[in-house]
Image (cartoon, rainbow, N blue to C red):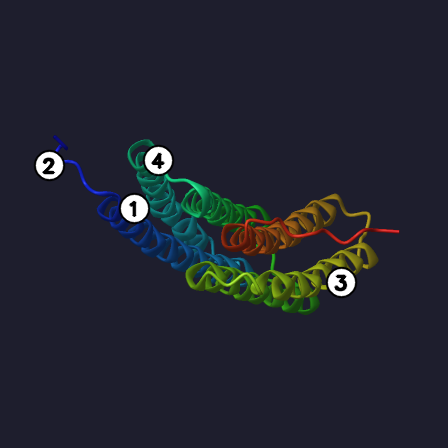
């Protein structure tokens, strides 16, 4: 006699899809917190506002808490739902997306800490302009990546790769300017190093967005993006 308390296969599947839908909402919240942090962290760095930078650093706790909450829910899904095939790809991809967003938020914390390290010196206009563009580019790429995840749209992977070229160009422009303006003053050199590291942090934020889109492509199609060969 069948166990009347056990869910039928369609019922179990609905439960799994409901769990994934709830976690998807949490991922979108995590992305919103992360992009808000990028904007706030960038502005704090541009303004040399140590108080605002500290607020960004403190705000990372909420991002970490949500990240751990998402991880716990997904581990529970793996343990209780035993997803397979496309559902398993969805769970694994969601875990990876959560991780990429958390790493992006950590990079924003590094930018905020750099604000303290160069204080009270102000950024020269050229550097300020480049950093401002890098912050906007990081926000835009992260939002596009999360739109791809929310819509399960793998076509954004190629778009984000193209967008990433713009971030790479900004990074090169920043480094060229820093090297051209380098002097023998040790304090100035140390500040230049901090600015260069900030540029690298933004470049890594953009890389995380590209990775999210690539994971979406895997989730939807079951295939990994083909990396272009370098001659």
Sequence-earlier tag: 1 or 4:
1
Residue 173's disc is 3
Q: Residue at x 49, y 62 (%)?
A: 148
Residue annotated with mark 4: 82
Q: Alpha-carbon distance for marks 1 and 4?
A: 9 Å
Q: Is residue 134 left or right of residue 5?
A: right
Q: Residues within 10 Å of mark 2 (few under 14, many from 20)?
A: few
Residue 4's disc is 2
Asked if disc 3 and disc 2 are in contact, CB closer than 8 Å, the reply is no
Q: Secondary structure at mark 1?
A: helix
Number of the front mark, 4 or 3: 4
**Closest to the observer, 78 or 205:** 78
**Closest to the observer, 108 or 46:** 108
Number of the front mark, 1 or 2: 2
Q: Alpha-carbon distance for marks 1 and 2?
A: 20 Å
x then y, percent, for residue 83: 37, 40
Q: Residues within 10 Å of mark 3 (few under 14, many from 20)?
A: some
Asked if disc 4 and disc 3 are in contact, CB closer than 8 Å, the reply is no
Residue annotated with mark 1: 16
From what the image shows, is residue 38 above or below residue 7?
Answer: below
Q: Alpha-carbon distance for marks 3 and 2?
A: 67 Å
Q: Residue at x 53, y 66 (%)?
A: 140
x then y, percent, for residue 178: 76, 56
Q: Secondary structure at mark 3?
A: helix
Q: Residues within 10 Å of mark 4 (few under 14, many from 20)?
A: few
């Amino acid at each position: 006699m069948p166990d009347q308390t056990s869910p039928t296969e369609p019922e179990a599947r609905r439960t799994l899809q409901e769990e994934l839908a709830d976690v998807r909402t949490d991922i979108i919240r995590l992305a919103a917190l992360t992009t808000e942090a990028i904007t706030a962290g960038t502005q704090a760095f541009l303004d040399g506002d140590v108080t605002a930078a500290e607020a960004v650093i403190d705000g990372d706790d909420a991002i970490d808490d949500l990240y751990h909450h998402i991880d716990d829910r997904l581990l529970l899904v793996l343990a209780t739902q035993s997803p397979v095939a496309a559902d398993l790809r969805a769970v694994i991809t969601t875990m990876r997306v959560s991780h990429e967003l958390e790493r992006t938020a950590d990079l924003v914390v590094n930018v905020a800490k750099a604000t303290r390290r160069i204080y009270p010196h102000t950024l020269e206009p050229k550097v300020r302009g480049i950093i401002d563009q890098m912050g906007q580019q990081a926000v835009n790429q992260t939002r596009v990546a999360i739109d791809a995840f929310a819509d399960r749209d793998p076509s954004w992977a190629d778009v984000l790769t193209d967008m990433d070229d713009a971030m790479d160009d900004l990074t090169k422009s920043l480094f060229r300017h820093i090297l051209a303006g380098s002097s023998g003053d040790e304090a100035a050199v140390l500040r230049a190093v901090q600015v260069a590291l900030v540029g690298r942090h933004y470049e890594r934020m953009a890389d995380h967005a590209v990775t999210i889109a690539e994971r979406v492509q895997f989730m939807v199609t079951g295939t990994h993006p083909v990396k272009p060969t370098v001659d």
